[in-house]
Image: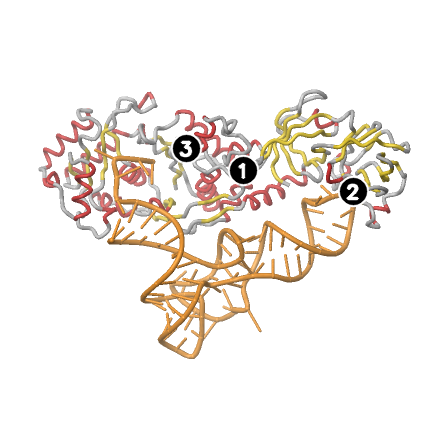
Amino acid sequence: MRCAPNPNGPWHVGHARMPAVIGTYRDRYDGWFCVRFDDTDPETKRPDLEAYDAILEDLEFLGFEPNEVFRASDRLETYYDYARELIEVGGAYTCSCTGEEFSELKNAGEPCPHRDKDTDTVLAEFEDMVAGEYESGEMVLRVKTDIEHKNPALRDWVAFRMIDTPHPREEASEFRCWPMLDFQSGIDDHLIGITHIIRGIDLQDSAKRQQFVYDYFDWEYPEVVHWGHVQIDAYDVKMSTSTISERIEAGELDGWDDPRAPTLQSLRRRGIRGEAIVDAMVGLGTSTSDVDLAMSSIYATNRELIDDETDRRFLVRDGNQVPLGGSPPAEANPPLHPDHEDRGVREIPVGDSVLLEPADLPGREERIWLKGLGCFQFTRDTLQYTGEEIDVVREGDVDVVHWVPARESVPVRMRTIEGDVTGRAEPGVAELEADEMVQFERVGFVRIDRSGDEDEETVVYYAHD
RNA sequence: GCUCCGAUAGUGUAGUCCGGCCAAUCAUAUUGCCCUCUCACGGCAAUGACCAGGGUUCGAAUCCCUGUCGGAGCACCA
């Protein structure tokens, strides 16, 4: 199988579907898959040199390594050879009609005057194309199909055209005669030995077009599955490489890994595992209709993956300071993980006042339980330590809330899909290493992106609740 | 205009090829209860679907026709 990306930028979430499915199938059935960069348009779909590696990194993040990597732009001579062969068996002709002229003839089911040129002329003109003797738009090579085919999309399609703009890759920058996707991909699939192709419904007619070439060469066409488009909920940004790219240019997004960008780099930075994405993508199946992927299904899998090994901490967003009274303990020691006492406890100095989230502020005379610390009653703007046992919580009268010390907490910037949130976390958080995962209790799972200290913000990326 | 393709709960999916075991599977979501010093994890329960209409048949989610809705192609893009 193959994954044939256009290297015009790092991958968005939707791109994960192809490697997820073919990679999973490969591993399950002892198969084979390659990545083949179909970079045959140096102009309108101009490749981004950095994207080749970025895509391979995205693939690695998802947990797959391709058996082989190809670049179509390395294989021009091969395509030329097969084009010559196709011309010799009368399967192609050079055509100098303008796009509109040909389109009109085609829609009327009429052949254009160039269709019956003799093979030698066609061959000579094609060699001139290869040599770069024509300007862009002057001459194309068409595959001779059936000009009266009932499906206009299949009639005498273009196999090669001239492009004046040099290819960004040094190795391919001299070529001016470039194959169209249907030709290049069709030839490559056969040569590489692809047995199964999955592609989008936008390429529904590709197999039928390429079948004409396969017939000329007497090749057998691989099995094909077409699948629909994937929509992902939860994002404001349109999921298209060019849109994301524009928004980065415009400064609306900080980069490809901005938490608001629907890219794999972004999910990775938020601490979502490739495995969770793959799992969700495989679950979508290969249906030909369009599907909506709920981010919640990726989150559900990821939560399952990380919950057990992720330590707990406190973060209070937009805290309100409340003084403490009644001589509470000087230090709180909640466990790092409720199910794993052996991992030890946290040491949170209490001080004389704490921060609580606005929604957690108790009403007058109400009692609350500061998690890991004890029971307090809200009296005259002060939380009075009551010293009551945990039983008051079990009885259901007292809510348990998270908190941080007002003084000894550390600043945190939490970057989320909806934007940045600031708050303060228990002191231990500043010492966590980048890349560690943490669950802020009653807030959600985050990945530490940059450690801070008492003054400098610890930056975390929010994964999910 | 021409040509293709699709339609099962909020979302995804199984079942459709070879009609009965489907008063329709599983996951996720939402809600409620239990557990719990987290609204996490775990447990239990509830919610919720075969696009419509005809036809074939003893019997249709499954086969056929029509309609409706949705998607895609008809590029010198991929």
**Residue at 78% across, 31% down:** A321
Q: Are marks 2 and 1 on the same chain?
A: yes
The subunit letter for the residue under badge 3 reads A
Q: Which percent across, then down, holds residue A405?
A: 79, 29
Quarter of the image where the C terminus of chain A is located: top right
**Residue at 54% across, 34% down:** A260
Q: Which percent across, then down, holds residue A360?
A: 75, 40
User: Mark 2 to mark 3: distance in Å?
Assistant: 47 Å
User: Mark 2 to mark 1: distance in Å?
Assistant: 34 Å
Q: Label 2: which residue?
A: A400
Question: In front: mark 2 or mark 1?
Answer: 2
Q: Nearer the viewer, residue A184 or A291?
A: A291
Left or right: A371 as drawn, with respect to A80: right
**Among the 4 quarters of the image, the one containing residue A124:** top left
- Mark number for residue A242? 3
Q: Nearer the viewer, residue A237 or A426?
A: A237
Q: A149 above or below A463? A: below
Badge 2 density bin: few <14, some 14–19, many ≥20, Cα 10 Å: some
**Among the 4 quarters of the image, the one containing residue B48:** bottom right
Badge 3 density bin: few <14, some 14–19, many ≥20, Cα 10 Å: few
Which tag, 3 or 1, sits closer to the chain's start? 3
Quarter of the image where the N terminus of chain A is located: top left
Left or right: A461 as drawn, with respect to A223: right
The answer to whether mark 2 and mark 1 are in CB contact below 8 A is no
Q: Label 1: which residue?
A: A274
The subunit letter for the residue under badge 1 reads A
Which tag, 2 or 1, sits closer to the chain's start? 1
